Amino acid sequence: MRDRQPIVYIISAPSGSGKSTLVNVLLAMTPRLDFSISYTTRPVRGSEQNGKQYYFVSRQDFEQMIADDEFLEHASLYGRDYYGTARRFLREAEEKGHDLLLDIDVQGAAQIKQKLPDAVSIFVLPPDRKTLEWRLRKRGEDSDEVIDRRLDAARREIENYDKYDYILINDKLEESSDSLQAIVLSERLSRSKSSLSAGDQEIMELANRQRLANMRNRVLPILASFRTLPPSARC
Ligand code: ADP
Ligand code: 5GP
């Protein structure tokens, strides 16, 4: 146990931006950071396992959990499937004295920010639309049609970037991983009562560069790359 509340970190991104890759690196490198495993009604994909990436439940069970107020937030995505963050993960993190990372969409992020205004939100962007398309193709999980749909969804999702505290442009993986870790550590440092070492100051500065106010100019060309190319354009 410790003397402060868990820090809740929210990370959102259009599919293919590299969010899962970044989250996996972050979790491996950061002590006392738990991942909230969401509940979903969508079918299992590829090598996913129940209880690892998600808890896969029926619609009926999900709706019962809503009725029992078991979710901190939940959303219906793509007009089809439910996704939700269970309250118990926050309770468990608090009991252990850990912080909590939520990988959720824009609607879920807005709900969490309303309930927990101190939550720290991070939006991951690809360097541009072409790179996103290339990454989706390289991942090799989706048909051309699904990729077109994801690119179209990405265009809409990224319009919400300015609702987030931090913006991470995932260009070079190592740099993005360092910046993501700096955000997490700097938020811990800013809530701690100890004085900051020179190394801590560097971490704070690196994180500060990723703040929304300092990233706006870098985001504009990315937004433009999504507006000018039609979804059917190929790499
Ligand atoms: P998401 O979770 O956002 O859908 P993934 O983490 O699955 O995205 O990444 C999509 C693809 O892009 C994967 O093949 C991954 O290895 C690759 N990738 C992720 N980050 C980078 C990066 N910075 N540079 C190049 N490729 C990347
Ligand atoms: P996928 O089906 O590709 O795994 O995820 C689709 C989207 O659902 C992603 O944007 C992911 O962040 C989001 N998501 C995953 N879990 C939750 C959750 O518990 N709540 C909300 N609101 N979104 C979630």
Image (spheres, grey):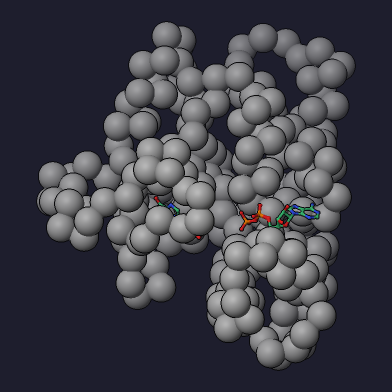
Q: Is residue 139 above or below residue 208?
A: below
Q: Is residue 230 left or right of residue 13?
A: right
Q: Is residue 120 left or right of residue 182?
A: left
Q: Is residue 112 left or right of residue 163?
A: left
The quadrant of the picture showing ligand 1 is: bottom right
Q: Is residue 4 above or below residue 104?
A: above
Give the farthest residue toward the front.
47
Name the spot of residue 159 as percent of width and height, x first.
Answer: 61, 72
Q: Examine the image and state in which quarter residue 142 appears.
A: bottom right
Name the spot of residue 91 as percent of width and height, x first.
Answer: 32, 26
Query: For the C terminus, which image quadrant?
Result: bottom right
Query: For the N terminus, which image quadrant?
Result: top left
Rendered residue at 79%/20% (across/down):
200
Q: Examine the image and state in which quarter residue 194 appears.
A: top right
Q: Total marks drawn?
A: 0
- Viewer-proximal residue among 226 and 43: 43
Q: Is residue 25 above or below residue 214?
A: above
Rendered residue at 56%/54% (across/down):
12
Q: Is residue 106 above or below residue 196?
A: below
Name the spot of residue 102 as percent of width and height, x first.
Answer: 48, 42
Rendered residue at 33%/72% (across/down):
80
- Viewer-proximal residue among 26 and 194: 26
Q: Examine the image and state in which quarter residue 198 appears.
A: top right
Name the spot of residue 172 as percent of width and height, x first.
Answer: 85, 50
Rendered residue at 21%/60% (across/down):
59
Q: Is residue 53 left or right of residue 65?
A: right
Query: Does residue 102 appear in this view?
Result: yes
Query: Does residue 219 appear in this view?
Result: no
